[in-house]
């Protein structure tokens, strides 16, 4: 059984507070994009085995695909084993949700293989144990995600808007970024309700003028190269540029294919991980 595990970008991200257990209360708009890992699972007699095309990715319990299989088998008392193959295309530690999407994909495939009666709602609750982004990936598309990420409100289709992504050659620790943002006074915050309206009305330019990610306060200060990437993308014709998640990936919307391609070509000369993609 095979499936595509799509990446995401954050069209806005606000941090509203911290719960007693250390989880942050969020209000963010997540958008799936046409950049994906390919996941294949096979039933076997017993145990869990993960293979990944990127040798830097752990294949033991640290891998969310492994954890997803494990918690599904525990929850539904599956007495079989599973083999998972991950063809990795989404960069890791990038703010694109690659690991979370892989975990959600495995949950959905395990459901289809062993327990077809299990609902998406059931899987989303299970996915919460893996991480705050996983419930969103059970549904995909475009959504407002609140709470710690588990309260999901699907939004209207916002597909076929072209994007260029630039991921510099370093990763960012999500945990450290959130710890730092707690120490900041956040003056610029997204008008989330207004952004939801722009998305539901498919108003790309209005959205682009309104996008805010409060985590930029931390990551851009720490890595000034990201400020340069944002400026360069604007100069190359992007109508809206933002950092996704805790970074470091920067994405920009383009109205014309030619401008997106020119930006891609320019950035590809400077950075190894550059992508042209679209919202789905």
Image (spheres, rainbow, N blue to C red):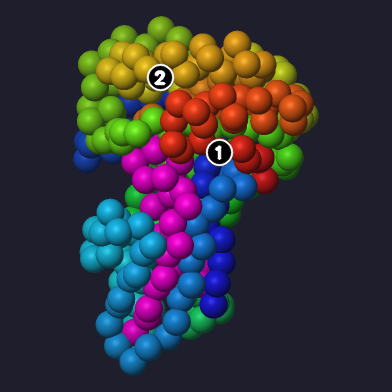
Q: Residue furthest front?
A: 269
Q: Residues within 10 Å of mark 2 (few under 14, many from 20)?
A: many
- Report which quarter residue 70 is drawn in: bottom left
Q: Position of residue 240 (x, y in %)?
A: 61, 19
Q: Position of residue 44 (x, y in %)?
A: 37, 88
Q: Secondary structure at mark 2?
A: helix
Q: Is residue 164 above or below residue 228?
A: below
Asked if residue 125 can be seen in this view, the reply is no
Q: Residue at x 46, y 38 (%)?
A: 273
Asked if residue 177 can be seen in this view, the reply is yes
Q: CA distance from mark 2 to mark 1?
A: 16 Å
Earlier-in-chain disc, 2 versus 1 = 2
Q: Position of residue 142 (x, y in %)?
A: 62, 41
60 with respect to 71 (left or right): left
241 with respect to 133 (left or right): right
Q: Is residue 269 above or below residue 223?
A: below
Q: Residue at x 51, y 47 (%)?
A: 7
In this figure, which residue is indicated by the disc labeled 2?
226
Residue range highlighted in magenta:
81-109
In this figure, which residue is indicated by the disc labeled 1?
275
Q: Residue at x 39, y 30 (%)?
A: 168
Q: Residue at x 23, y 30 (%)?
A: 176
């Amino acid at each position: 059984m095979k499936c595509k595990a799509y990446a995401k970008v954050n069209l806005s991200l606000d941090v509203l507070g911290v719960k007693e257990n250390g989880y942050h209360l969020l209000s963010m708009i997540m958008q799936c994009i046409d950049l994906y890992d390919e996941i294949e699972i096979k039933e076997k007699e017993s145990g869990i085995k993960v293979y990944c095309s990127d040798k830097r990715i752990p294949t033991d319990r640290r891998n969310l695909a492994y954890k997803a299989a494990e918690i599904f088998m525990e929850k539904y008392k599956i007495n079989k084993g599973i083999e998972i193959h991950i063809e990795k295309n989404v960069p890791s530690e990038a703010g694109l949700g690659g690991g979370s999407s892989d975990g959600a994909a495995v949950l959905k495939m395990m459901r289809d293989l062993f327990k077809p009666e299990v609902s998406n709602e059931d899987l989303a609750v299970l996915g919460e144990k893996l991480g705050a982004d996983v419930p969103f990936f059970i549904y995909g598309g475009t959504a407002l995600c609140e709470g710690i990420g588990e309260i999901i409100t699907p939004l209207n289709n916002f597909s076929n808007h072209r994007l260029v992504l630039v991921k510099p050659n370093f990763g960012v620790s999500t945990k450290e970024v959130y710890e730092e943002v707690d120490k900041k006074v956040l003056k610029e915050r997204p008008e989330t309700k207004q952004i939801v309206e722009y998305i539901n009305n498919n108003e790309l330019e209005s959205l682009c003028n309104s996008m805010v990610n409060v985590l930029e306060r931390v990551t851009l200060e720490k890595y000034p190269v990201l400020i340069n990437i944002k400026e360069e993308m604007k100069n190359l014709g992007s109508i809206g540029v933002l950092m996704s998640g805790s970074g470091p990936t920067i994405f920009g919307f383009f109205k014309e294919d030619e401008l997106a391609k020119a930006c891609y070509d320019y950035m590809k000369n400077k950075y190894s991980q550059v992508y042209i993609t679209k919202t789905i």
